[in-house]
Image (tube, rainbow, N blue to C red):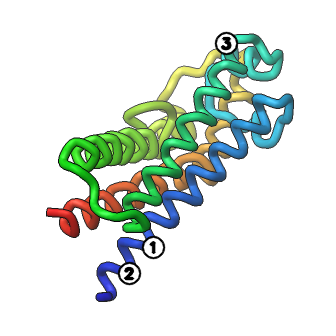
Amino acid sequence: MTARTDRAALAARVAFVCAFLYGAMKLDWALGGEFLIRQAPVPAAALDDLLARTPGAVAGHWASVALALVGMGAALHLSGRFGPHGRFRRAALLAGSWAGCAFMVARAAGLVGYGFAGDVRVLAGWGAIPPAYEDLVRDQVFWDLVLWSPYWLLFGTCWGVAAWRYRRATA
């Protein structure tokens, strides 16, 4: 095995761990826990729904748990843990992996949600924040800058590296 293959396999394992941690957090929320729930970078109304455990919010947590399980399985496949896949399964795995990579990196950059660009915009005072939500937004920006955006960037980058390696290894 080359060093490049080792790094790519490591990326798939990191993607697995990221999916596991995200799924575990969402499972905690679905079961009534509050681990990092107040630090979620969402609008005030959505945060109120999360804290009130509205049926829609809880259903969203369960959907996220299911998606995390799918992501964990995909990461195992990208790592080369399983034998070769048929043409359709390979294409589906790569399409899902590239889509996940694109979404996560876009989220980290700020094209979806706060992200680094949105965080800087708020911290620099370039965005209009309603006075009633100023403290909430500043707290969310802090957590997004130090936790969520780096997490999504790591997760998305690992998906991309693992998918690239898988594509090349199975071409």
Q: Position of residue 48 (x, y in %)?
A: 76, 16
Amino acid at pointer 3: Gly
Nearer-the-camera pick, 123 or 79: 79
Q: Position of residue 34 (x, y in %)?
A: 83, 35
Badge 1: how crowded within 10 Å, few (<14), some, or many (20+)? some
- Viewport quadrant of the N terminus: bottom left
Can you see residue 39? yes
- In the picture of the structure, the residue carrying the numbered disc 1 is 10
Q: Position of residue 120 (x, y in %)?
A: 49, 43
Quadrant of res 83: bottom left
Badge 3 marks a residue whose secondary structure is helix
51 horizontally vs 144: left or right:
right
- In the picture of the structure, the residue carrying the numbered disc 2 is 6
Which label was assigned to residue 56?
Answer: 3
- Viewport quadrant of the C terminus: bottom left
Query: Do the residues bearing badges 2 and 3 touch, measured as CB atoms within 8 Å?
Result: no
170 horizontally vs 69: left or right:
left
Badge 1 marks a residue whose secondary structure is helix
Query: Do the residues bearing badges 1 and 2 touch, measured as CB atoms within 8 Å?
Result: yes
Please tell me whether residue 90 is drawn above or below residue 34 in the rendered image: below
Please name the residue shown 81% across and 42% down the image.
Answer: 35
Q: Distance of mark 3 from mark 1, alpha carbons?
A: 36 Å
